[in-house]
């Protein structure tokens, strides 16, 4: 399978996350937190073990600058320009402006997801699969988050599902543009390294950090262990 097929699977996970909100009244917060912890461990491992070293090996200091640019871009779109966003179900009423701004920020982020998948496959099919795994794990919480924000702002179920579908479309667009635009294909790996590092460390970890008990920590370190197991199978 090529990068576009994996992007389609990732996009479907966005919609599945939204469907989990729109088709049932109650969602297990604990289950979501454990999934987020697992995704955080996997994403940080991919970023620090594969994406960041590969980008710096290829481009040196310039690669490091693009890693930083990717990191800053996510903060800009998800926190500096958006006043309210977190990877989890929204339980409080929010304004329509908040939901729209969160969607705009997430569209840029999910476009970056597509860039990351395509960039990974440009280096090797094995790296592409690992990057896809990291992205896939946080796609369901991402779809859940944007759909619940839309509902909290007074939107319909159709609007909530539509917002998640747009995130999927942005991921697919990221793959297509990376494969057709030379500079993005070259520096996309570094950008995705910064994006993946930010999402894992700054978006996902705070969602479960400080929670009582050890299950969240087990899930986090389990995500790291799953990454190394997957890496042993795919790369060797």
Image: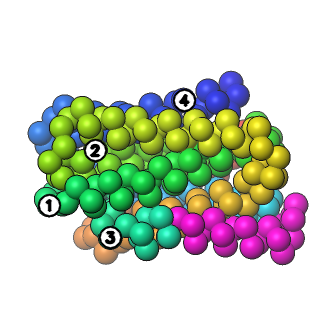
User: Which residue in the protein does label 2 denote?
Assistant: 147
- Percent across and percent down for residue 200 are 51, 62
Residue at the location (47% across, 49% down)? Answer: 107
Which secondary structure is most common in the magenta stretch? helix
Q: Position of residue 37 (x, y in %)?
A: 41, 58
Q: Is residue 61 magenta?
A: yes
Q: Position of residue 69 (x, y in %)?
A: 66, 69
Query: 150 or 29, which is in the foreground?
Result: 150
| Closer to us: 90 or 197 | 90
Residue 101 appears in view: yes
Question: Residue beneath label 4, please?
Answer: 8
Q: Please tell me the numbered disc located at residue 92.
A: 1
Instruction: Identify the disc placed on residue 83.
Output: 3
- Mark carried by residue 197: none
**Left or right of residue 42: residue 38:** left
Q: Residues within 10 Å of mark 2 (few under 14, many from 20)?
A: many
Q: Which residues are magenta?
A: 56-74
């Amino acid at each position: 399978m090529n990068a576009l097929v994996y992007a389609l699977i990732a996009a479907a996970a966005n919609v599945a996350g939204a469907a989990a909100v729109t088709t049932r009244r109650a969602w297990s917060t604990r289950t979501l937190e454990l999934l987020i912890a697992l995704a955080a461990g996997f994403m940080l491992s991919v970023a620090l073990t594969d994406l960041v070293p590969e980008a710096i090996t290829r481009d040196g200091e310039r690669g490091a600058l693009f890693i930083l640019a990717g990191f800053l871009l996510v903060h800009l779109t998800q926190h500096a320009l958006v006043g309210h966003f977190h990877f989890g179900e929204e339980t409080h009423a929010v304004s329509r402006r908040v939901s729209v701004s969160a969607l705009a920020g997430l569209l840029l982020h999910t476009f970056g997801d597509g860039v990351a998948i395509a960039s990974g496959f440009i280096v090797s099919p094995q790296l592409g699969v690992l990057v896809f795994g990291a992205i896939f794990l946080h796609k369901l919480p991402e779809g859940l988050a944007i759909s619940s924000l839309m509902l909290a702002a007074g939107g319909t179920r159709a609007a909530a599902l539509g917002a998640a579908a747009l995130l999927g479309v942005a991921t697919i667009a990221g793959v297509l543009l990376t494969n057709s635009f030379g500079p993005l294909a070259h520096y996309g790996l570094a950008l995705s390294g910064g994006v993946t590092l930010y999402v894992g460390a700054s978006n996902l970890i705070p969602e479960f950090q400080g929670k009582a008990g050890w299950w969240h920590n087990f899930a986090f370190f389990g995500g790291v262990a799953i990454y190394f197991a997957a890496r042993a199978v795919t790369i060797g």
